[in-house]
Image (tube, grey):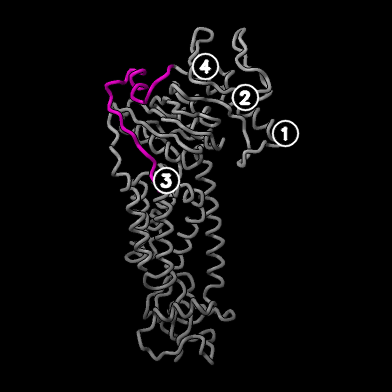
Amino acid sequence: MRLFFLIVAILVCMPCTWAAEKPITRGSVVVVPVAGAISEAQFFFLRRIVKAAESAGAAAIIFDMDTPGGELKATERIVQMLSKSTIPAYTYVNTNAGSAGALIAIGSKKVFMAPVSAIGAAAPVVGSGEAIPVTMNAKIVSYYSGYFRSVAEKNGYYPQLVDGFINLDKEVKIGDEVINPKGALLTLSAQEAVREVGGRPLLASGIADDVKQVAEMVGLASSEMIRIEPSGFEKISQWITMFAPLLLLGGAIGAYLEFKSPGFGVAGTISALCFLLFFTGHYIAGLTGLEVVAIFGLGVLLVVIELVFFPGVIVVAATGVALMVGSLFFAMVDFYPTQPFVFSFDLVARPMANLGIAIIATIGGVSLLARFLPDLPIFRRLMLAKALPLGSSLPRARHHTEFPEIGDAGVVVSTLRPSGAARIGAKVVDVVADGEFLEAGTSVRVTAVEGKRIVVTRSA
């Protein structure tokens, strides 16, 4: 239990680790490092900053880039994020925008280069750096070169450059000038990138000594500059969001087991921890805010109110469950604060899949538990240990020599939710209520005996 509270304290304090960051202000320029390998964790970090910048009304974002490249899928997600954002993003290549970095750069509004820097060489390779098999490589190159050509054209870059970055089999030609021959990947130095071709820069809008000079070159010299570094917990959030269905399953199963046993114990602790991890991970990943957590808490409160004060009033618990499920769903939806929510399949596909998997698995798990759990010795011992007072001389169910029969009368010893313990005759046995929760002291009679499973109902 102490470990649980320690974990809770750490998770609650995770968002507070951002308190050391200088808050983003209206009209400021947010400088974000894009360093090391491009990955899903990098995407989560950048998405959080873009959303925070939008909410605060920042004037611009500058990517301070020094990367050798990374995952194409993460790169695509970052570029998609930039296309959604209402804040202009600029890239400062300091000093390397290799591979995926070059593709992210063309996803921004303008590119600037350090005096000694390079950009390009974005041919896809496997994680170990080896070439991809020919057929698969052809498919990947065909798709991504088409996708990033459209990105380049939208942002005012020469789309032919993308073929030079990605495709060995394409000659890059702008007008009558051959920029890059077939059989070689295109890599541009700072001086080559700013060279005018066809009346405009080949790629970069200028050469700058630092990000402050970049801000001056885009007309934001008077704006406050705020630099934000990634939190160590943002990498943890990647794993939490990946395993969202398992956390939802653990939370639901734990809650079910807690309702079936009196008091607050291991099952309730596991359930609370799973939901806490779920919401904390999605909060860190920038997918949700605290309002979603509040809605989930309200749903839990409504369910508890029905169970404690208004048992049998379905509408209260149903409303609570709807709020809980809705909050879990919207915690996974990737929407941006300055944009109206527009329904699209791409937006809700992943949340629907995660929630669907969790619901189906929960139904299957609860069905198995309802069928077999009452017969497990460890569960019988747990139920009786909580139901009987300390030092009680009442025998445990496993010591019975006589088994109840249909029609036998008894009294509930521990609350049946629907499982628990009842005194049938002179014996205390494990029973299951038929269709309703029964409080301790309720008179019951046996209506069915199925192997070791004893079903009881309230006496008339």
Residue bounds of the magenta highlight: 206-234
Q: Position of residue 48 (x, y in %)?
A: 39, 39
Earlier-in-chain disc, 3 versus 1: 1
Query: Label 4 amino acid?
Result: Glu
Q: Secondary structure at mark 3?
A: helix
Q: Secondary structure at mark 2?
A: loop
* Residue 156 in sight here: no
Bin the neighbour count of mark 4 within 10 Å (Cα to Cα): few under 14, some 14-19, many 20 and up. Answer: some
Q: CA distance from mark 4 to mark 1?
A: 31 Å
Earlier-in-chain disc, 4 versus 2: 2
Asked which quadrant contains residue 57, the reply is: top left
> Seen in the image, is 136 located left or right of residue 321?
right
Query: Mark 2 highlights which residue?
Result: 185
Earlier-in-chain disc, 4 versus 3: 4
Query: Mark 3 highlights which residue?
Result: 234
Name the mark on residue 192. 4
Q: CA distance from mark 3 to mark 2?
A: 34 Å
Name the mark on residue 134. 1
Earlier-in-chain disc, 1 versus 2: 1
Along the line of sight, the residue nearer the viewer: 222 or 328: 222
Quick one: which residue is furthest to the front in this view? 116
Quick one: which residue is furthest to the right in this view? 135
